[in-house]
Amino acid sequence: MRDDPRLPTSPGFWRSPLRGPWFTSVLGLVLLVGTTVLFVTGLVSYAAYNPDLSPVNDQTPDKGILGFYLFPWPTDPAWLYRLNQGIHVTLGITLIPVLLAKLWSVVPKLFALPPARSLAHALERISLLLLVGGALFEFVTGVLNIQLDYVFPGSFYRLHFYGAWVFFAGFAVHVALKAPAAVRNVRHMRRGAAPEDDLVPPSPDPATFSRRGALGFVGGGSLLLFGTTVGQNFDGALRRTAILAPHGGAEPGSGPNGFQINKTAAYAGIDPAETAEDTWRLIVTGRSGAVRLSRAQLARLPLHSSSLPIACVEGWSTSDQWWRGVRLRDLARLVGYEDDPPDVFVESLQRRGAFRHAALRANQVADPRSLLALYVNGEDLSPDHGHPARVIVPAAPGVLNTKWVARMTFGDL
Ligand SMILES: Nc1nc2c(c(=O)[nH]1)N[C@H]1C(S)=C(S)[C@@H](COP(=O)(O)O)O[C@H]1N2
Ligand SMILES: [Mo]
């Protein structure tokens, strides 16, 4: 069976002259750097949720030591999350052709017999399964999430989080097992000898395509994806180039509220009757009790402005918008925290669905740029941007900027 060239288990079955250590190594090197950046920006994105703050931000059950985190997420620079997540998503999409080409280049190994020649070889194959499976899983869940909006059973967040660690485990074992051979190979090549490699087909078909041409094809695919995605991090004409992004590069209308919207008020099931001036009240609770405020009362508190972007975990962001509202630390003051604002738990009017509540860390509350915004770009917030009031915090993931706020509970979480 091993030698029947009609079967993929036979080396003779694989005839593309493109396969070989050079093609695989170049792609592997790109992925080595690229997936490292993806893993690190992914962990940073995780940290940006302040995962140990309360169960509402980090919904990963039984994460144990995997959910380690080292620091309260900073509020400076204000574009921190925008940059991190822009890199994570844009790079992830750009690397898709490289990943596919790399998998294609090593696919004969998937069928190689016997399944394991030794314990080390068995370990290596299992680690490859984790590595390849983990990488595929991360790319597929990531893309589905940004394109199709949380279609998963359970939560994207959990799946992508655990998937990343499975991938990393495979990656670590793979590197540890392969490094000695890679070093040997490089030494061989330095001496001008061809590396030993079972990727080279024993009976190749004639070439119709050079290896460089194939690499160019892969790189061209990456460039095309990059060019049709990256614009979602910018405004105006640049955003319109992001035809592959989930919002298709379209701005929702023009004017002061004409910047990207995640979920509309209608989608979130916000009833206009609940947000009307004479029905909506904000309830703020803390050390000294609770305060109920109408929007008019809020608007008579000291108002402040900050220029801050919205940066969604899904990889789009807006440039700075000019928000105006009440400082979160002033709201903390109203309920008994004079100089030492604590954490806050923010709840929306929204009854169903994700993102209807969020917890913010004390350092985020204390930042003078953190607002409960009533206005944006000189106008009332539109219903879709969170009227009557929404949170905006520098450097935080968009998901922490709760819209249609109904209740804020200050106290250490
Ligand atoms: N109540 C509520 N607040 C919310 C959301 C939501 O779905 N419901 N979406 C969040 C997410 S994921 C983002 S990126 C921002 C987007 O804000 P925008 O729609 O005003 O751009 O709002 C956040 N606040
Ligand atoms: Mo978001």
Image: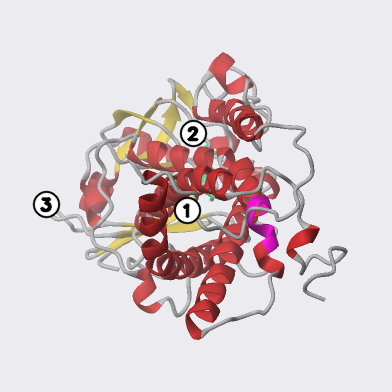
| Circle 3: element type | loop
Asked whether the beta carbons under mark 2 and mark 3 sit within 8 Å of each other, the answer is no
Disc 2 target residue = 317
Write the residue at 65% across / 48% down.
19
| Circle 1: element type | strand
First in sequence: mark 2 vs mark 3: 2
CA gap between label 3 and label 1 equals 24 Å
- What's the amino acid at mark 3? Asp
Q: Is residue 106 magenta?
A: yes
Q: Is mark 2 within 8 Å of ligand 1?
A: no
First in sequence: mark 2 vs mark 1: 2
First in sequence: mark 3 vs mark 1: 3
Disc 1 target residue = 406
Asked whether the beta carbons under mark 3 and mark 1 sit within 8 Å of each other, the answer is no
- Where is residue 240? Give x, y as percent: 63, 20
In front: 203, or 314? 203
Crowding near the residue tagged with mark 3, few <14, some 14–19, many ≥20 C-alpha atoms within 10 Å: few
- Where is residue 136? Give x, y as percent: 62, 58
- What's the amino acid at mark 2? Ser
Write the residue at 85% across / 69% down.
4
Q: Give the range drawn in magenta.
A: 104-108
Disc 3 target residue = 339
Q: Is residue 270 left or right of residue 293?
A: right
In front: 373, or 70? 70
CA gap between label 2 and label 1 equals 25 Å
Where's the N terminus, which quadrant?
A: bottom right
Write the residue at 46% across / 46% down.
29
Whether residue 49 is situated above or below residue 369 in the rendered picture: below
In front: 184, or 319? 184
